[in-house]
Amino acid sequence: MTPEGKIKRVVSQELKSRSDMYYFMPVPGGYGEATLDYVGCYRGQYFAIETKKPGGIPTDRQKHTIRRMSASGAKVFVIDGDLTELKHWLDTTT
């Protein structure tokens, strides 16, 4: 499993543990609008997650997508191993 794949596994486990959670992982196909690794809604709050290998950073295209999603009101996370911010947001979202 790739380093990014290991991060995705941990993120998926966290998301699956939440009962009020809807999310999906879009399959990249090169068609249509760019998106991030996870897109979902938790207790009425739209979110997206881009996972990276430890120390990795989003590509320019991903940064553009992150800016667009954030501007629309989405909570966007870039996770390279530490889920602290995501868990805090999930724990405090009502």
Image (spheres, grey):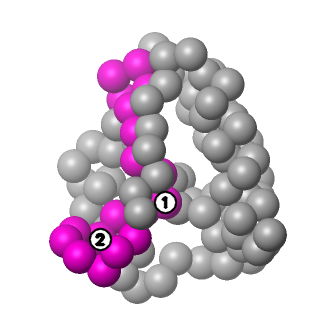
Q: Residue furthest bottom?
A: 60
For the point 34% across and 75% down, which residue is it?
29
Mark 1 residue type: Asp
- Give the SS element for disc 1: loop
Neighbour class for label 1 at 10 Å: few (<14), some, many (≥20)? some
Tell me how far mark 2 sits from mark 1, CA to CA. Answer: 10 Å
Neighbour class for label 2 at 10 Å: few (<14), some, many (≥20)? few
Secondary structure, magenta segment, majority class: loop
For the point 35% across and 37% down, which residue is it?
46
Quarter the N terminus occupies: bottom right
- Give the SS element for disc 2: loop
Left or right side of 2 for 59? left
Q: Is residue 65 above or below residue 20?
A: below
Residues in magenta, as a range: 28-45
Name the residue beneath numbered marker 1. 37
The spot of residue 88 in percent (x, y) is 65, 31
- The question of residue 32 being in magenta is answered with yes
The spot of residue 64 in percent (x, y) is 32, 74
Mark 2 residue type: Ala
For the point 72% across and 51% down, which residue is it?
9
Res 30 → quadrant: bottom left
- The question of residue 70 being in magenta is answered with no
Residues marked 2 and 1 touching at CB (< 8 Å): no
Residue 48 visible in the snapshot: no
The spot of residue 57 in percent (x, y) is 60, 78
The spot of residue 45 in percent (x, y) is 36, 29
Q: Is residue 19 above or below residue 61?
A: above
Q: Which of the pair 50/30 is nearer the observer?
A: 30
As drawn, the label of residue 34 is 2
Residue 33 visible in the snapshot: yes
